[in-house]
Amino acid sequence: AVVSTQSGHYGRELQQHALLPLLARTFALNIGLDCVKRKWAEQIPEDHLEVVAMCCALKPICSWHLENLVSVCRERCGGQGYLSCNRFGTFIGLAHAAMTAEGDNSVLIQKVAKERLAMFKPQTTVP
């Protein structure tokens, strides 16, 4: 009985170690999405490019996270993860669609990075 209790506790710790960081990241991304939605609804013309950049940055990050989250959850369920009632297949499909619907997410991230780096470009002054 002692061995099974210890192995059960150890197994629970392994599950928590794998899933809790993903849950925390999900909450953080949700807060970021709420912020972007609020900025989009209340935007003024001067802020439009900033809001678009935020959308372009969050979209790939969220879809990559969803794909990772669903894969880890399915793996942690063992054989049960393959059952259709758990709907992991549906969410994996949604994650893959989000990663390829508007082109590769890497392109969006590169676009945002290029725009952000251009902000630090030295300005030339004409004497």
Image (tube, grey):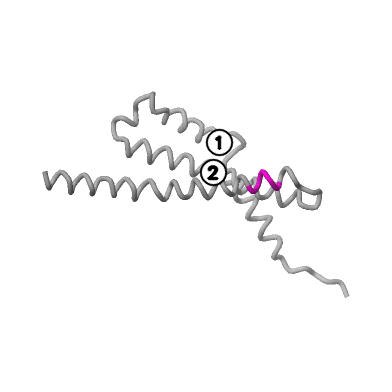
Residue furthest top in the image: 84
Q: Amino acid at mark 1?
A: Ala
Q: Classify the position of the N terminus by image quarter.
A: top left
Q: Amino acid at mark 2?
A: Cys
> Pointers 2 and 1 in contact (CB under 8 A)?
yes
Q: Which mark is residue 98?
A: 1
Q: Which mark is residue 38?
A: none
Q: Residue 73 placed where, x, y %? A: 38, 38
Residue furthest bottom in the image: 127
Q: Residue 81 placed where, x, y %? A: 34, 31
Residue drawn at 46 percent across, 50 percent down: 24
Q: Which mark is residue 62?
A: 2
Give the number of marks: 2
**Mark 2 residue crowding within 10 angstroms, few (<14) / some (14–19) / many (20+):** many
Q: Is residue 57 magenta?
A: no
- In the displayed structure, does residue 15 sit left or right of residue 37? left
- Front one among 110 and 81: 81
> For the residues carrying marks 2 and 1, which lies nearer the camera in this image?
2
**Mark 1 residue crowding within 10 angstroms, few (<14) / some (14–19) / many (20+):** many
Residue drawn at 60 percent across, 38 percent down: 103
SS for callout 1: helix
Q: Which residues are magenta?
A: 35-39
- In the displayed structure, does residue 100 sit left or right of residue 40? left
- Front one among 119 and 89: 89
Q: Classify the position of the C terminus by image quarter.
A: bottom right
> In this picture, is 45 found above or below 126?
above
Residue drawn at 68 percent across, 50 percent down: 53
- Front one among 14 and 6: 6
Magenta span: chief secondary structure: helix
Q: Quarter-wise, where is residue 88 in the image? A: top left
> In this picture, is 83 found above or below 42?
above
The Cα–Cα distance between marks 2 and 1, rounded to whole angstroms, is: 9 Å
